[in-house]
Image (spheres, rainbow, N blue to C red):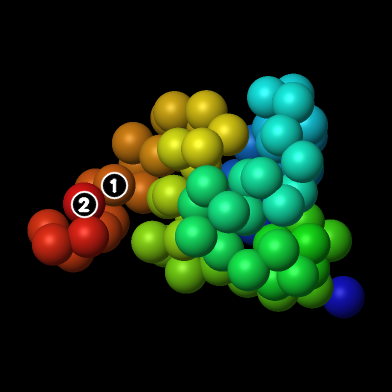
Amino acid sequence: MQIDSTQALNLPSLRAAREAKGLSLRAAARSSGIDPGHLSKVERGEKQLSIEALYRLATVVNLDDLAAQLKALLPKAAA
């Protein structure tokens, strides 16, 4: 069993953030450039996202503090 990295960081779950914004899984995946099946597994704690993908998703679901922290870790070309 994998630990949800958002729980380890004491952050709201990605699913809760997505749902709070009123986005379907498919809409959030499409907006952040992530495969919907992969995002589903990420939300269930079965898969992980790259820093770049997590940054894009955090931006889409308005996790602004997380996005700001991740942006600092991105290569300059990706930011």
Q: Which mark is residue 79?
A: 2
Residue in the picture at 68% in, 24% down: 21
- Residue bearing mark 1: 71
| Cβ atoms at labels 2 and 1 below 8 Å apart | yes
Q: How many marks?
A: 2
- Residue 13 position, x and y percent, is 73, 41
Residue 77 lies left or right of residue 38; in this view the side is left
Q: CA distance from mark 2 to mark 1?
A: 6 Å
Q: Which class describes the residues within 10 Å of circle 1: few (<14), some (14-19), or many (20+)? A: some
Three-letter amino acid code at the position of disc 1? Lys
Between 76 and 69, the residue placed more toward the observer is 76
Residue positioned 75% across, 49% down in the render: 25
Q: Residues within 10 Å of mark 2 (few under 14, many from 20)?
A: few
Q: Determine which quarter of the picture holds residue 78.
A: bottom left
Please tell me whether mark 2 sits on a helix, a strand or a loop: loop
Indicate which disc, 2 or 1, sits on the residue closer to the N terminus. 1
17 is higher (above) or lower (below) than 15: above
